């Protein structure tokens, strides 16, 4: 009896010694089970070895075995979740939270330590799509073909207008050429690169401000053709969290955590062999402190991805601050979001020109509360000489909003040579020719196209052909469709509602206004940066002529207008162009006909950028408390006299107020409250 018991105990100890390093939860189960269960658990664990032993051949589809969430939730088309997980789960500490996005499952210490903004999911999805197409182009030159999960035959999405039931001849010829190249490529032997696998000839990626490492983990799990990913953050807690998340998602063979200053990491990688192929900068606020190092650390023809969330500065609220950070004066206007894109591109090109480098914008978008630009950086002294002619000063009328651009430089062709000289100007007089008001001077800004349409079309084709890859695929398709429809050679835009409010008349329907411009022989398009945008090559005088013609059928009470108001000045002039408001078929773009998701509403309450993280690792709640305090302030009347303004009223300025020096806006309310107290 004793010998049999000793044999059983010895056998159990042997199995426990083999099983304990594998699964902590299985160890607890073995303690309470018999011999048959021990053998069963041992066989099961032996067949389900840890993926970390096979990191070089692990695919992204197998990472769900170590996550603390159900396997079916790892589908990229499922919704993003944030759930509290039990501390007994392997790899988790007490109170930790698992947040899932795409194929990544990220560990967070707690809700107060590290913040997660689900609104930025569109930013991360779009970045994965852009880097995938960039890797496809770069690795194709080396004979490497990337394999994207769920991607089958490429579905080409063309938004060109159809004429007589036939697609434009140029588009059809381009489609045939692309198909022929793909057929020729199929005949060749290619080296394939899959997601989650290290590609020795692949791209080196740096995320300078990684925080939790969510973006870098998604790169490793969703973008094929990568050699290494460096996720850097200055915070020690963030660097430790990045390392844990890399191990939790089984991407430690590709992703390395770094705890250093982002600028120093990039400055030390300025050598030609140490440069990064892709650099992603997504800071809280302004990226200006990191741009000088970034334009030097990116490789020749490499991709630089930059996010700016300081939109209050770039949109004109603090022009002097914008100049100190980006070297450009911002203007508060209706086209401020596109101007913000052109300000950051101007800053990037100016920083790169110092080192004989220049930029080629691939995609520049203004969405939600931030702007995002993707540029290719190249080296060339001859091309850098064109930098001055790519920048322009901006003259904006404070009355009617009409604007004019003045190039900083001028280039003329002299046979095989180019001559560079200073531009002549200004393009406007001291006062606006339409309303007589003064001009504001803004800029300089980037005056060249914001996008590379061919590259954007490739991203659009890939996302449309594989809609389950990203949760925000519909919105990506809608935004990129509008980007392909924009007039690339026309900087900035007008807002239709602003044109109407200037002359105090009803707003004409968008299709009728666009049709009037088309009838007049001008081009017109929407803008992804503004819902009511009118981007056109027509001069401001044509726009006001159309508004004058519209006002005749929708008259304004002229007696209420001031003689010096812009409306009176504009309407007192007879139009030289007789506008035709008959709706044309080409006035309605394809993205609008197809009802694509172009401008989404705010997804949740207190929506916007999160609060800034404290140096100690926590989050400052001042911004959130302030936002909640002022939420709906115009709808809620203020009854507390202490919250009202204490400035003199209009009667005090005229000298007719009876309260004298004690006058303030709240004196009427104070008088009522004093009478109530006496009663």
Image: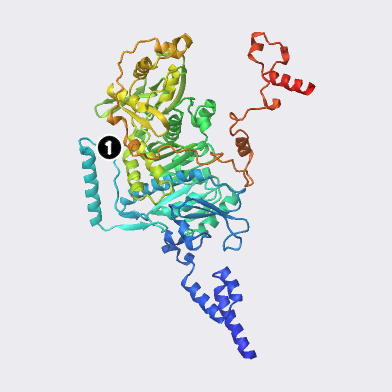
Q: The C terminus is located in which quarter?
A: top right
Vertical side of 334 occupied by 356: above or below: below
Q: Picture coordinates of residue 512 (x, y %)?
A: 33, 25
From this viewpoint, is residue 277 visible?
Answer: no
Looking at the image, residue 112 sits to the left or right of residue 524; the answer is right
Residue extending furthest toward the right: 678
Looking at the image, residue 8 sits to the left or right of residue 422; the answer is right
Which residue: 66% across, 23% down? 645
Q: Quadrant of residue 627?
A: top right
Q: Nearer the viewer, residue 330 or 140?
A: 330
Q: Picture coordinates of residue 371 (x, y %)?
A: 46, 37
Q: Nearer the viewer, residue 129 or 482?
A: 482
Q: Quadrant of residue 642?
A: top right
Q: Picture coordinates of residue 573 (x, y %)?
A: 37, 10
Looking at the image, residue 460 sits to the left or right of residue 20; the answer is left
Q: Quadrant of residue 8?
A: bottom right
Circle 1 — which element?
loop
Vertical side of 31 occupied by 320: above or below: above
Q: The N terminus is located in which quarter?
A: bottom right
Residue extending furthest toward the front: 679
Q: Nearer the viewer, residue 315 or 77?
A: 77
Which residue: 31% across, 13% down? 576
Q: Picture coordinates of residue 19 (x, y %)?
A: 55, 74
Looking at the image, residue 536 sits to the left or right of residue 414; the answer is right
Which residue: 48% across, 47% down? 207
Q: How was this image coloured?
A: rainbow
Q: Which residue is mark 1?
A: 160
From this viewpoint, is residue 311 visible?
Answer: yes
């Amino acid at each position: 009896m004793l010998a049999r018991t000793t044999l059983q105990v010895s056998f159990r100890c042997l199995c426990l010694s083999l099983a304990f390093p594998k699964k902590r939860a299985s160890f607890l189960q073995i303690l309470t089970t018999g011999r048959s269960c021990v053998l069963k658990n041992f066989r099961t664990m032996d067949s389900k070895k840890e993926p970390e032993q096979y990191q070089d051949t692990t695919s992204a589809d197998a990472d769900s075995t170590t996550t603390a969430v159900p396997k079916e939730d790892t589908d990229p088309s499922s919704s993003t979740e944030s759930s509290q997980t039990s501390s007994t789960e392997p790899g988790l500490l007490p109170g930790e939270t698992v947040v899932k996005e795409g194929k990544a499952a990220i560990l967070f210490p707690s809700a107060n330590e590290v913040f997660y903004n689900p609104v930025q999911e569109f930013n991360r999805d779009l970045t994965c799509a852009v880097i995938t197409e960039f890797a496809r182009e770069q690795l194709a030159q080396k004979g490497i073909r990337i394999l994207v999960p769920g991607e089958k035959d490429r579905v080409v999405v063309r938004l060109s207008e159809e004429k007589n039931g036939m697609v434009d001849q140029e588009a059809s010829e381009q489609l045939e050429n692309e198909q022929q190249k793909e057929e020729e490529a199929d005949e060749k032997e290619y080296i394939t690169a899959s997601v989650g696998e290290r590609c020795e000839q692949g791209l080196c990626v740096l995320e300078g401000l990684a925080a939790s490492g969510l973006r870098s983990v998604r790169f490793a799990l969703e973008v094929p053709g990568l050699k290494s990913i460096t996720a850097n953050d200055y915070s020690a807690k963030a660097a430790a969290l990045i390392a844990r998340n890399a191990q939790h998602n089984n991407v430690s063979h590709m992703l390395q955590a770094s705890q250093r200053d982002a600028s120093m990491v990039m400055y030390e990688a300025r050598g030609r062999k140490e440069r990064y192929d892709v650099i992603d900068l997504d800071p809280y606020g302004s990226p200006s402190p990191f741009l000088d190092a970034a334009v030097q650390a990116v490789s020749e023809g490499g991709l630089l991805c930059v996010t700016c969330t300081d939109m209050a500065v770039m949109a004109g609220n603090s022009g002097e601050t914008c100049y100190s950070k980006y070297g450009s004066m911002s203007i508060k206007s209706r086209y401020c979001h596109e101007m913000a894109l052109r300000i950051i591109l101007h800053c990037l090109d100016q920083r790169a020109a110092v080192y004989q480098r220049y930029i080629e914008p691939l995609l520049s978008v203004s969405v939600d509360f931030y702007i995002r630009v993707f540029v290719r950086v190249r080296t060339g002294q001859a091309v850098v000489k064109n930098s001055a002619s790519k920048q322009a000063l901006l003259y904006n009328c404070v009355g009617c909003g009409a604007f004019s651009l003045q190039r900083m430089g001028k280039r003329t062709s002299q046979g095989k040579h180019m001559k560079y000289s200073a531009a002549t100007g200004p393009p406007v007089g001291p006062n606006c020719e339409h309303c007589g008001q003064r001009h504001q001077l803004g800029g300089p800004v980037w005056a060249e196209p914001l996008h590379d349409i061919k590259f954007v079309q490739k991203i659009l084709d890939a996302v449309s052909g594989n809609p389950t890859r990203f949760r925000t695929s519909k919105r990506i398709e809608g935004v990129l469709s509008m980007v392909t429809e924009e007039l690339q050679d026309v900087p900035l835009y007008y807002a239709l509602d602003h044109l109407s409010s200037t002359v105090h008349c009803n707003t004409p329907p968008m299709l009728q206004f666009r049709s009037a411009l088309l009838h007049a022989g001008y081009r017109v398009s929407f803008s992804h940066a503004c819902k009511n945008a009118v981007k056109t090559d027509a001069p401001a005088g044509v726009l006001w002529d159309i508004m004058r013609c519209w006002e005749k059928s929708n008259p304004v009470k002229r007696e209420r207008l001031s003689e010096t108001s812009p409306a009176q000045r504009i309407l007192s002039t007879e139009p030289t162009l007789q506008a035709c408001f008959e709706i044309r078929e080409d006035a309605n773009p394809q993205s609008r006909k197809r009802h694509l998701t172009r401008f989404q509403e705010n997804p949740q309450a207190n929506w916007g950028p999160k609060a800034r993280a404290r140096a100690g690792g926590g989050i400052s709640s001042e911004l959130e408390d302030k936002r909640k305090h002022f939420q709906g302030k115009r709808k809620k009347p203020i009854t507390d006299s202490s919250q009202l303004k204490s400035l003199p009223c209009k009667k005090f300025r005229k000298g007719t107020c009876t309260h004298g020096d004690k006058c303030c806006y709240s004196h009427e309310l104070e008088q009522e409250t004093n009478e109530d107290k006496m009663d």
